[in-house]
Amino acid sequence: MKRKPSLLDRRAGHGNQPNGFTLMELLIVIAIILILMLMAIPTFGTLKKRANDLSAINSIQKINQAEIEYESTYPANGYTCTLSALGGDPSSGPPSPTSSQILQGDLTSGYKSGYKFNLGNCSKVTQNGTDRITGYQVTAVPETVGKTGDRGFCSDESGQIKYDPTGGSNCTQSLQ
């Protein structure tokens, strides 16, 4: 009488079949993963630049709002022509025209999300021997054009934001 093979016997009989994957199968899987990663890397860079662009636009809006608040808080001074005057440490004392504590420190440093920010082109009038700033321009340009951003952004006391498609501060095109 012939014995029926058990499960252990059947497993033992397949001893010459390889367990796991062959080297060729692993290399094919790794090659496919590398191809997918190479396709995703340019997309990631584009998404990062777009995020930096949106952050720069949002930051310019915040600077414009801070300038309006500064001008209403210190009407004798008008606007300010430095980012540092819009910032300041609350623990250093009460707000003042040179440290109004309106903006957070990351933006008043002049660098945020791959962009450099600057306040300049200030226009002023002298009233009763005191200079009053009546206009300003805020600019945001990429730290490295093509890498951290593609466009430069500008605004002034009107609040309208324009951009320079070459990444500079010659902003002529309106955002829509």
Image (cartoon, rainbow, N blue to C red):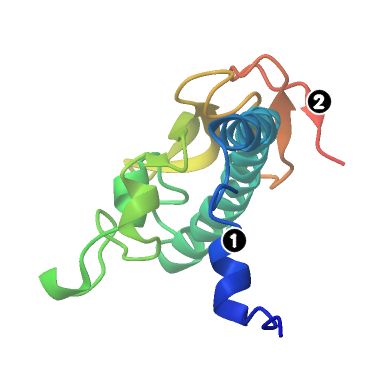
Q: Residue furthest right?
A: 176
User: 39 above or below 129?
Assistant: above
Q: Nearer the viewer, residue 163 or 157?
A: 163
Residue under label 2, please give it: 173
Residue drawn at (64%, 37%) of the image: 29
The reply to whether residue 52 is in sight is yes
Number of labels in the image equals: 2
Q: Mark 1: which amino acid? A: Gly
Helix or strand or loop: what does disc 1 sit on? helix
Q: Residue furthest left?
A: 92
Which marked residue is nearer to the observer: mark 1 or mark 2?
1
The reply to whether residue 93 is in sight is no
Expressed as whole percent of the image width and height from the top left, the position of residue 69 reads 50, 65
Residue 173: image quadrant is: top right
Q: Which of the marked residues, 1 or 2, is nearer the chain's N terminus?
A: 1
- Label 2 neighbour load within 10 Å: few <14, some 14-19, many 20+: few
- The reply to whether discs 1 and 2 touch (Cβ–Cβ < 8 Å) is no
Residue drawn at (36%, 39%) of the image: 110
Q: Nearer the viewer, residue 9 or 89?
A: 9
User: 80 above or below 40?
Assistant: below
Question: Which label sits on residue 36?
Answer: none
Expressed as whole percent of the image width and height from the top left, the position of residue 44 reads 63, 38
Q: Mark 2: which amino acid? A: Gln
Q: CA distance from mark 1 to mark 2?
A: 76 Å
Residue 120: image quadrant is: top left
Residue under label 1, please give it: 13
Expressed as whole percent of the image width and height from the top left, the position of residue 11 reads 58, 68
Expressed as whole percent of the image width and height from the top left, the position of residue 35 reads 67, 28
In the rendered image, the quadrant that contains the N terminus is bottom right
Q: 144 left or right of 28?
A: left
